[in-house]
Every structure is written in C-alpha cells, then in structure tokens.
Image (tube, rainbow, N blue to C red):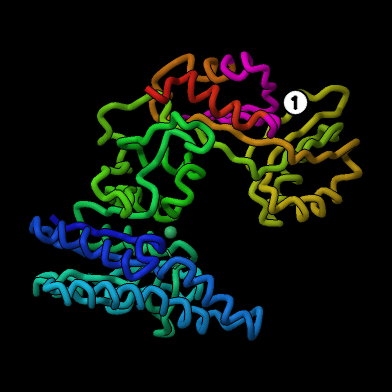
Amino acid sequence: MLRVLKFGGTSVGTLDRIQNVAEIIKKFRNQGDDIIAVVSAMSGETNKLIEYAESYTKTPKSDELDMLLSSGERVTSALLSIALNSQGYKATSMSGRQAGIVTDSAHTKARIESIDTSGMKDAIADGNIIIVAGFQGVSQDTGRVSTLGRGGSDLTAVAIAGAIEADLCEIYTDVDGIYTTDPRIEPKAKKLNAISYDEMLELASLGAKVLQNRSVEMAKKLNVNLVSRSSFTPDVEGTLITKEEEIMEKPIVSGIALDRSQVRVGMYGVTDRPGIASAIFTALADANINVDMIVQTVGVDGKTDLDFTIPTTDWEICKTVMEKFKGETENIDYNDKICKVSIVGVGMKSHTGVASKAFTALGSENINIRIISTSEIKISMIIDEKYAELAVRALHDAYELDK
Ligand code: ASP
Ligand code: MG
C-alpha cells in the first residue's frame, strides 16, 4: 500500500520529535508499505523567518520571501531523511521542485498547476522512502521557488496523494482527530470515526488547527481519503475524511461548530425598492467583504429591515461602504456581541424535525435566536455571544453526540 504521511510543525518541532516521526515511518515500512512523507518546518520556524525578513522591510519581494520560507521545510525533510538513513532505512529527501510540483507565479500564495510524479515513482521503485519538503513548488514561468500559503504543507500532501493515486493521506498533528465539538467547551465531545468532505468544510472551525481548508477542498476534488491523527499518540486511530457514500453509519448530526468572529449589521428602515439589495451587496462584494447570513423582513409602508453578518476583521471597511446607503436607511447599527452556532450533518438531508430540535434546545435554555439560516447539511443560528458555550452544550446534548 502507498501511504502519504504529512507531519506538521509540532510533530517535527525538535530533534526528538523528528526521531519520533522516523519511528512512525519505520513501523509502516516494516509492514511493507511504500511511503511518501511530507513535512512542515519546525514549529515557529516560518514565523521566525518572516520576522527576519521584516526586520529589513515590511514589504520584501515575494519571490525572495519564498526562497527564504521554503528553507524551513527543507531543513526538516533533510534531517528526517538523514535520521532514517542512519538507522538503516533507505530514504531520500526532495524539494518541491524535485518532487515535480509546478505552480503558478503568485509567490507566497501559489497554486499548484501540475505534479510530475515520475521522479517520485522512480525513487520508490529504487526502494526509497521519500521525504518531501512541504509548502513549496517551482513557478512554471520564472523557474523560481514558490510557496503555497500558510499551512500549505497539507496541500502538498493532498496534491501528491491525488496525483500519485496513494491509498491514503494521513495528516499528523498534535490532535488525534476531529471531534463532535470543541472539547474545551464540551468535555463530553467525542472523536468522530469518519466524516464527509462537505461536513468537514462546514465544521472548519473544529478542524482549523488540524487541517487547512483548501486541502480538504482539494481532497474532495481529487477523491483522496484523508485521515486526521496525532503523531503524539500514533496508536490511536484518527478521523477518516472521505466521500459521503463511503460512510456506513451516517449520524443525523455530526458536529456543532461555533464562530465568535462575526459582526451583525442591522439596517433599519431601508427604502424598499427593486435593486436595493443588489446595490448593497454588490458594494460589499466589491470591497471584498464576505457576507455570511442575510435576512430581510417583510416590507411595510415602503420600508424594510435588512440584517446580515460579516467577519469582524471586515468591520471597518463595512462601515465605510455603509456610508453610501445612509440616505436610504433610517438607522444602521452594529453588534459584535453575537456568535454563530451551527449544527452540521449529512443525515439531515433525509430526516425531519432536525431544526425544531435545535430551536427547542436553545429555547429551553432561554436563549433567543436572532437569525437562522439553513442549507442542505447545516443549520446556523445567530445568538448573543454570552450564551455561546451554553448553546453548544445544549445542542450537543440534544442530538446525543456524546453517545
Ligand atoms: N511552514 C508553513 C507554515 O507555517 C507551512 C506549513 O506548515 O504547512 O505556514
Ligand atoms: Mg498546519
């Protein structure tokens, strides 16, 4: 079996940790598996290199920054290979270029255009364990080293697994999988055995420290079976992230996500005319503001109310955009003391009463729901931030996610 294993920054954070990774690789090798390991830089290393560059200028040339940042991953790939060689295992390290990863020339946030897997295939045929420096490739146009954006080693691993048709892509971090909700909020949260790509994307806040979202999207596109697991507890099985059809037991609800980083914008007494929503949301889109939930109330006497949420980071720009609509609005107010709780599960497609159970759970805790939105596999509710944790626990209980 061909395994792609990806080890994040904390998993290779010290020489001892690198040796621990070598032990994981040796175990699979002894079973007869072929292995491509993709490594991150030692934890903190990429930030340190960025600081070094910024000590000269806040705007270093992006291709020079890529040359600098790509070095962190090269260090760990070579060290891991040296460790394995010294212990009698045939291994070879590869830069992104040597692994055949070709990108566009958007330095510091390059996109992978193609992967020529022939070099990796030859090295495997020669009996090598391959250790790839993650997060980097080579720009097709300029031939310069490029990097894939923060957290990009996950993307390297998934892209290689897809291109070379590996059986599995295991992402090792210091967390042993994806949980039904944040265990710091609900200690009864349970690790999921399996979850679909779409659920994982909706539960991004739960996986944020575990999996880069872009890499989950790519895994879905390339049909790569992903596993999230820990290099600190390698005997514990992680969470499989795969196609919905592959999951035998589909729970109605898989998890509860919480997002505290939104602001609710209320526009009251907006002139109720055709094209007003278009004007407002086009202006927000032009300012690159990612609007999440939108509600418009029924118009009365030529006026209507419009509520929507935006990321807190876009608050200032949003205020500027809203200036344009002052003439057509009686009042605009902002509330950042809110949060969004969401229940996510593919099973809700085919079950009734899922939403009412959520509303009842919050109602019986006396939590007022201010905005509701639903999609095929998600129900999101905006509530006051002070009830965030209570709401998560109430919903976790209502769907018996601890069972
Ligand atoms: N070292 C890079 C970063 O910190 C890439 C990665 O670890 O995935 O963003
Ligand atoms: Mg990472």
Q: Looking at the image, in which quadrant does ligand 1 appear? A: bottom left
* Of residues 332 and 174, the one drawn nearer to the viewer in this rendering: 174
- Give residue 373's quadrant in the image: top right
Residue range in magenta is: 360-386
Residue 217 drawn in magenta: no
Pointer 1: what residue? 297
Q: Residue furthest front?
A: 16
Q: Is residue 240 above or below residue 306?
A: below
Q: Quadrant of the N terminus?
A: bottom left
**Image position, residue 371 (x, y; %):** 67, 28
**Image position, residue 138 (x, y; %):** 38, 78
Relative to 330, 221 lies left or right? left
Q: Is residue 103 above or below residue 387?
A: below
Residue depicted at x 83% and y 39% = 333
Residue depicted at x 26% and y 66% = 19
Residue depicted at x 32% and y 27% = 250
Secondary structure type for disc 1: loop
Residue depicted at x 31% and y 54% = 231
